Amino acid sequence: MSFWDLIVSLLGQGLVITLLTTVLAAILALVLGFIAGLMRLSKNKLVRFLVSIYVEVFRGTSLLVQLFWIYFVLPMFGITMTALTAAVLAIGLNFGAYTSEVVRSGIQSVDKGQIEASIALNFTKVQRMKRIIIPQAFIIMLPNLGNQLIELFKSTSLVALITLTDLTYQANVLNATTLQTTQIFTALLVIYFVIAWPMTKGMKLLERKMTEGRM
Amino acid sequence: MSEPIVKYNNVTKYFDDLMVLDGIDFEIQPGEKVALVGPSGSGKTTFARLLMTLEEITDGTIEVEGDYLWHEEDSNGELKPASTEHLRKVRSNIGMVFQHFHLFPHMTVLENIIEAPVTVKGIDKKEAIKDGKEMLEKVGLSDKADTYPAQLSGGQKQRVAIARALVMKPKVLIFDEPTSALDPELVGEVLDVIKDIANQGETSMLLITHEMDFAREVADRIAFFDAGKIVEDGPPSEILYNPQAPRLKEFLERFMSTQASPE
């Protein structure tokens, strides 16, 4: 097969799964990250403690082991799921833990004067978070969230190891049948890069749009 | 004399072991403009921040229009710490303009002004925009409605901040060194706006300031703070031209000499 044929063949069979896993896991990570990040700022000690367990467990163990655990170990406790669900869950939980730190530090780095102004204007705490603090914190978080998204996208190559037929899985299959190892894995590199690069650019663009004239 | 709009009863404030306010009793009458002066660290800012609920009271009570700010009476008539609802209800009478403006950077000037009326008071957006534009005209910034704060000068930012506070129609408006962060040539435009509001009368004002001329012009009364106490309190003519307390005399002398000395 020519190099071009390899790329087309890989894309045709693995792209959808890679992108689907990326998008679903990213949404889960963002939602979990915001929930956990806000809970970390709670006044309630127990809430903070519970969240810190989640964050430390998922940051302190390898994503690959988490994938294996969710896909191969949970069934022994009667919890079975498809490879895609397991992949999205593992990656989402793992990146959610990191994202929660981004969210927490983003919220904490909003100028304290903004809180005082909100109190002086008699906002409730929820109104203050929603209308004043989070919109500003989100802009501060954007560069980090962008990095996380790229990292998350690249980490989806691990899902091949729990039988999910993503780009990397297809490359392995193709390698076994054609033995064009150099071309196949070079093609794989190129594909990951070509997808990641516009993501980086897109995040930069979003950042610029959101700060235009404001900061 | 009518009922005071704000009443401090034996108000004490500690930061850890450090006493900042030492059992202060103080009254502000409706419509009265009171300037708070004194050396830095004398407690005047903390005194005002307690009224805005930006610092927690350690001991004593503050009443706003006869309602306790930091406390509520339970069924036995005993004071207990105020619930959030009670605090917000009483706080709605108070507004504040900060030294560093604290405008919302992610909103345009007009959005800054209508945010609290719409979100906090639930006023119809169209009406809030109408009020907001009127208020912008009052502070002379009608042409800046759609500008973001980052593109304004310090003086313009402070005028927006004043409009944002005024549109909530507070009965008491606190100014915390409103011109201290401004370049000298921008001080005048902000002071003019504050004078205008003062001349319209109905809002009571607490002015923390180092501008003695301004205090003399605007204030009905000047309170001199030193070491957590109000040492002397009276009309500007008394405080500035006939000071009694040695600490006040010293303060004024130092103040006049720094003002007179050529830079």
Image: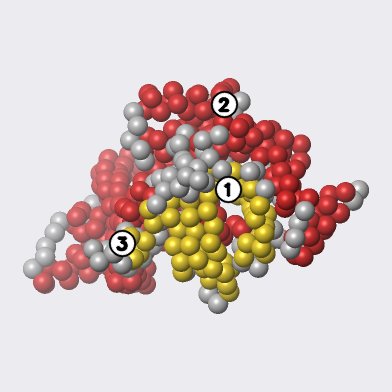
Residue A68 lies in quadrant: bottom left
| Cα–Cα span, label 2 and label 3 | 40 Å
Mark 2 or mark 3, which is nearer to you? 3
Secondary element at tag 2:
helix
Q: Given the image, on which type of amino acid does mark 1 rest?
A: Leu
| Badge 3: residue crowd in 10 Å (few <14, some 14–19, many ≥20) | few
The residue depicted at 26 percent of the width and 45 percent of the height is A20
Task: Report the residue marked by disc 1.
Answer: B206
Q: Earlier in the sequence, mark 1 or mark 3?
A: 3
Distance between the alpha carbons at the discs numbered 1 and 2: 20 Å
Q: Dot 2 corresponds to which residue?
A: B138
Q: Chain of mark 1?
A: B
Q: Where in the figure is residue B192, as x and y percent of width and height?
A: 67, 33
**Are marks 2 and 3 in one subunit?**
yes
**Residue ID for mark 3:** B73
Q: Position of residue A41 (x, y in %)?
A: 38, 62
Q: Vertically, is B90 above or below B61?
A: above
Q: Chain of mark 3?
A: B
Q: Which residue corresponds to the image point at 50% horizontal and 65% vertical from the top-left?
A: B11
Q: Residue A84, percent across and down?
A: 20, 53
First along the sequence among labels 2 and 3 = 3
